[in-house]
Image (cartoon, helix red, strand yellow):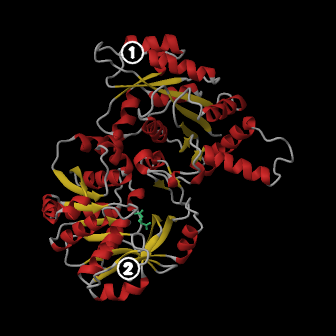
């Protein structure tokens, strides 16, 4: 029978609740248990697909095509499993299904109420995810922080589940301990406040994970124990880590895994994080770098937000680089500066490889095309992800095939020569303003052509990768592109769509219509990223 662990955030957000949840699951998994992860996002949006990535972070895509929070990506990477629609809960999703059911008379004509019907729907989703994964432990991260109006209903769900299944539910609170510069001393008061807030929701945490710049000392642990009603052993020190992959190891130093088991009445077991520790060793070792430039349409925001919007791409680069014991150095290059002055393109020579990641809208597209042309002509390894493939095809059509006005229907709907075009079904959806969850989403099969970079990377003919886009390579131009030397190395067998393009006589020039970054794993880098990094190093 599954056990349920709810991870709840104290009075501050952005303290690594997702990584904490991923790490707790990782530890239990390393003790031989089956785990799954659920992310609860309290906003009314049905999914993350319609949200601005600059505000919300990356839109991660599951194999079954759900556009969700980036934490689902963290869980997949930490647990090395694939999650589905059941693992992602939002207020919008919960209300939508309750309302649909009400409309279908499935509540038998009774009054449908926020409590208990909404929490009950959340509970049934949490249980379903556990069943689907046949999990021993279901970890649910409740987004937001305690005391917020928005996530109350999910705390209520957690409380109700605990009432129904006593002994099978645990609450872990993750809080932040500030060290005010003026005092130089770690303060526990916000943690005490946070516990009061969850208490008001009828919840008592069994374990408190104390995030801070420094490790927690004994007096601090004692204080939290006394005031927050947990034993001293259940106050886990979680100092800032150099890398997220270090966090499970840090938690285990405070024996977190066996504390959880003990509280559930399960005998302690040894954890096996050897592989993981090996990776952390590589990460922390001083090593040569590999320098990657990411050309995109960026905003005046700092690097931080951008890193969040492209977290899976960054993780994929890291996993690829660590595989070769290199440290990636990633730099953000604004495409617009190449539009303003082509001389700026020269800076691309300083990089071992260039990526144009996914994106929407035309701003910066001409600069991206210029950057890609520069990489093609100067034999700089180039890797295009989704939009990055589309831009590469436009560049090739213009500068190699001589189709001077080649473009994408996304930026130039009435263009004569849209080598990137919209599928008729997508056109209809946009016309009807049906934007939510209507892109080509989720995993699709792809057949690889023997003797290509792609085939060499995957070492098999059929594979599948995840998509999130509306536009495709226009069939009408395929013959011309191929005659001029563009290799179409991956095809969707069912619909004969172009999925991968590449060039010969170039150290690495490849674009994918899918997003390979969604399937990377720290110890199993995504094959195309791995090969891209290999080419960057060999260059
Ligand atoms: N904007 C492009 C499309 O919709 C590319 C999308 C992407 O890069 N994810 O097809």
Label 2, on which residue? 419
Q: At x 31% / y 66%, what residue is drawn?
A: 365
Crowdedness near tag 1: few (<14), some (14–19) or many (≥20) residues, C-alpha within 10 Å: some
Residue beneath disc 1: 187
Q: What x and y, as percent, mark residue 176?
A: 42, 25
At horizontal 59% and vertical 31% (from top left) the residue drawn is 149
Q: Nearer the viewer, residue 105 or 271?
A: 105
Position of 419 with respect to 39 (left or right) is left
250 shown above or below 483: above
Which residue is nearer to you in this view: 482 or 51? 51
Q: Is residue 333 left or right of residue 99?
A: left
Instruction: Name the quarter where the N terminus is drawn.
Output: top right
Above or below, 224 relative to 106: above
Q: Are marks 1 and 2 in contact (CB under 8 Å)?
A: no
Q: Secondary structure at mark 1?
A: loop
Mark in the foreground, 1 or 2: 2
């Amino acid at each position: 029978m599954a056990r349920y662990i709810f991870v709840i955030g104290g009075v501050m957000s952005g303290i690594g609740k997702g990584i904490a949840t991923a790490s707790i699951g990782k530890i239990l998994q390393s003790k031989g248990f089956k785990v799954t992860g659920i992310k609860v996002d309290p906003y009314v949006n049905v999914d993350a697909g319609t949200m601005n990535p600059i505000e919300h972070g990356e839109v991660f895509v599951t194999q079954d095509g759900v556009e969700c929070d980036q934490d689902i990506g963290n869980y997949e990477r930490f647990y090395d499993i694939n999650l589905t629609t059941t693992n992602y809960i939002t207020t919008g999703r919960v209300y939508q299904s309750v309302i649909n059911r009400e409309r279908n008379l499935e509540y038998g004509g009774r009054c449908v109420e926020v409590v208990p019907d909404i929490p009950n729907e959340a509970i049934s989703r949490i249980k379903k995810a556990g069943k689907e994964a046949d999990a021993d432990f279901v970890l649910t991260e409740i987004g937001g922080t305690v005391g917020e109006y928005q996530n109350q209903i999910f705390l209520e769900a957690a409380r109700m589940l605990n009432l129904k299944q006593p002994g099978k539910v645990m609450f872990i609170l993750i809080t932040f301990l500030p060290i005010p510069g003026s005092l130089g001393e770690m303060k526990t008061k916000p943690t005490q406040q946070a516990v009061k807030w969850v208490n008001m929701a009828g919840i008592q945490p069994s374990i408190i994970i104390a995030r801070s710049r420094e490790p927690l000392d004994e007096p601090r642990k004692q204080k939290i124990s006394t005031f927050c009603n947990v034993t001293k052993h259940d106050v886990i020190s979680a100092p800032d880590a150099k890398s997220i992959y270090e966090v499970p190891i840090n938690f285990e130093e405070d024996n977190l895994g066996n504390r959880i088991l003990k509280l559930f009445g399960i005998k302690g077991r040894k954890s096996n994080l050897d592989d993981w520790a090996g990776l952390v060793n590589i990460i922390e070792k001083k090593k040569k770098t590999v320098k990657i430039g990411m050309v995109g349409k960026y905003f005046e925001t700092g690097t931080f937000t951008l890193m969040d919007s492209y977290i899976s791409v960054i993780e994929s680069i890291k996993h690829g680089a660590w595989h070769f014991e290199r440290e990636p150095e990633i730099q953000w290059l604004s495409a617009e500066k190449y539009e303003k002055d082509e001389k700026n393109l020269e800076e691309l020579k300083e990089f071992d490889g260039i990526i144009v990641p996914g994106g929407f809208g035309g701003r910066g597209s001409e600069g991206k095309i210029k950057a890609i042309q520069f990489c093609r002509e100067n034999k700089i390894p180039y890797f295009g992800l989704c939009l990055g493939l589309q831009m590469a095809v436009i560049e090739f059509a213009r500068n190699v095939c001589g189709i001077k006005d080649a473009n994408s229907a996304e930026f130039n709907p009435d263009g004569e020569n849209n080598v990137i075009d919209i599928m008729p079904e997508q056109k209809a959806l946009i016309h009807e303003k049906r934007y939510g969850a209507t892109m080509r989403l989720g995993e699709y099969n792809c057949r690889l052509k023997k003797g290509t970079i792609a085939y060499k990377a995957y070492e098999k003919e059929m594979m599948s990768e995840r998509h999130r886009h509306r536009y495709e390579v226009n069939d009408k131009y395929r013959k011309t592109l191929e005659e001029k030397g563009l290799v179409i190395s991956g095809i969707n067998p069912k619909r004969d769509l172009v999925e991968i393009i590449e060039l010969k006589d170039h150290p690495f020039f490849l674009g994918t219509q899918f997003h390979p970054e969604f399937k990377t794993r720290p110890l199993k880098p995504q094959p195309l990223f791995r090969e891209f990094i290999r080419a960057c190093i060999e260059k």
